[in-house]
Image (cartoon, rainbow, N blue to C red):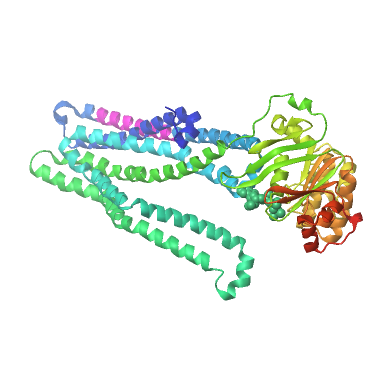
Amino acid sequence: MANNNPVDRLLCPIKGQLIFVMILACLGSMLTIVPLAGIAYIAKLLMGGIGTTAIFSQTDLQTEIWWVAGVSLAGLIIGVLLVAMSELLAHLADNQITHDLRLSVMQRLTKVPLGWFTNRASGDVKQAMQDDIGSLHELTAHYYTTRGRCYGVISLSAIYLFVMDWRMAIVSLIPFPCFYLIFGAAKKAISEDRMKGFMSGQALINNAIAEFISGIPVVKTFAASGKAHKGYHEAVDGFLQGFLNFTRPLVAPLANANAVIAPIAVLGMVLIFGTLFVSLDWIVPIDVLPFILVAPGISSPLMLLSFSTHSLTHATAAADRLQALLDSPVLTQPAEGKSRHIVDNRICINNLSYAYDDQNTVLSNINLTLAPNTVTAIVGASGSGKSTLARLILRFFDPTEGSIALGGVDLRDIETTELYRRIGFVLQEVRLIHASLHDNIALGRPSATRHEIEDAARAANIHQRIMDLPKGYDSIIGEDISLSGGEQQRVSIARAILLDPPILVLDEATASTDSENEVVIQESLLRFSQGRTVLIIAHKLDTVMTADQIIVLENGEISEQGKHESLLAMKGRYAQLWTLGNYQEHPLEAF
Ligand SMILES: Nc1ncnc2c1ncn2[C@@H]1O[C@H](COP(=O)(O)OP(=O)(O)OP(=O)(O)O)[C@@H](O)[C@H]1O
């Protein structure tokens, strides 16, 4: 049966190494017990135990003591070396898996549909790439060696004590099962409801903090009313209550459990029962020494064992998220060569429907052709599905029903690189990278000359703004310059223009631009779109009134379709939107 444990699946490539480091750590820590046993043995020799005076001459006794001391020292040195080696190998294994995981996540991210990113905050990806891989470090680099060391110390100590005297071993080890009894009872006291309350409180507070930080300007504006902080306060109070419910039943039992196995408590047990057994003549006083030396040393590895389960819980949650990321569905890539059948730059949308989830169909039964050399505009109320349609043409997602063909070939049969070589796009949400303005514009064509980049920037009406900067095109975004939303859009328009694609999709490409710049950009886009297949999504109807066809979307369906004049004459939804927008006829400024 396949192993579905996310930790096991993620750590599978280094499982062998982890088992090996665990065994090394176990052996190493066992050897560190040898000096304690050696000390006890030497003490017994010196005190005349084991009938030594009878069998050892003075010289033999000295030789025996040197031997034992030598073996003890060797045990200690080899033990420490083995433990150190296990730590080193665990960190090497961790480096390997971290490196491989980062690469796998990156590779996966390059294969997921672009629409995947619209559904996820970049914070999620950052959490997986940085925080979750960091949590796995606890597991790979430390958990297995810690467990190995603990098992080694506990098992060899117990065996050694039983070999020394089984009765003393039993009474010396009694505190340790007691620890688990008390600790186990405490864990049972935390019902699933309490655990859920604590976890959901934690999630609520995380969201509240994120909202609080992102909304600080608003919070400050409304702080006088005191209401703005309410959500945050409620989340904090809720978390506190959940935290108290969760921890209250734990505090006392945990303190008791820890007290029971504290080294001093174990030593107390050893001394009390040692005295008793000596008075009963079951053992001689020197027989208590191994228990004094070794039994208290079991406490800390036992505590470490119980705490190390925390890192396992943490790592399991992290592994879950990472595995989900690695299992994200990828965009199916067609067999090579199908793109060769693309005959022109015509886009045909056939009976297309799309739903983001099972319940809500966002687009239904769309039939539309975007012919080469024409500009098609999509208008409609907010939420009518305009951006979704644009994203489907860009293959951010595949249609739920129906198909989109480019030059007679289904988009699903066109390799991604070929698709984006043919279709350029400028979307509402602009993404610029932390690099120079030159590199940002040349992102899709790194071989472009400075002259070509400047021409593209001129067409997007951003050239002069860039030239006014002290470092010009070499200004690093985010370091040398902070661009406004409109300026960012103009940089991304320059980027699309430089790519020179035969098909262009513009989704509110000038939405953040002021009216003056908008007119200039619309004019340059108009020049640029000549001879291409262009799809424009616009909120402002007057910016697309000269489009070859205007599509009116209503609740995910095409309600009207035609040229500006014929749509106005229909006196339908378009005419209504035109009247509501109080637009003026000024065709020169439009497409
Ligand atoms: N990633 C998504 N996941 C789920 N639903 C979505 C997603 N993106 C959009 N929607 C929903 O799909 C519907 C259409 O959204 P879309 O963004 O396509 O509309 P729009 O006409 O472009 O709106 P606007 O003009 O405001 O940008 C809306 O109801 C929206 O809530």
Asked if residue 77 lies in the magenta stretch, the reply is yes
Where is residue 379? Give x, y as percent. 76, 52
Q: Which residue is drawn at 31% across and 57% down?
A: 249
Q: Quadrant of the N terminus?
A: top left
Quick one: 262 or 103, which is closer to the camera? 103
Q: Which residue is drawn at 24% across and 33% down?
A: 160
Asked if residue 188 lies in the magenta stretch, the reply is no
Q: Can I make out residue 469 in this image?
A: no
Q: Which residue is drawn at 16% across and 48% down?
A: 272
* Numbered range of the magenta stretch: 62-84
| In the rendered image, the vertical position of residue 421 relative to residue 299, given as above or below | above
Q: Can I make out residue 514 in this image?
A: yes
Q: Residue furthest front?
A: 570
Quick one: 85 or 385, which is closer to the camera? 385
Q: Residue furthest left?
A: 280
Instruction: Identify the image quadrant of residue 228.
Output: bottom right
Instruction: Identify the image quadrant of residue 37.
Output: top left
Left/right placement of residue 242 relative to residue 166 reads right
Where is residue 372? Give x, y as percent. 85, 38
Quick one: 294 or 499, which is closer to the camera? 499
Left/right placement of residue 313 relative to residue 346 reads left
Where is residue 179? Give x, y as percent. 26, 47
Where is residue 144? Give x, y as percent. 42, 36
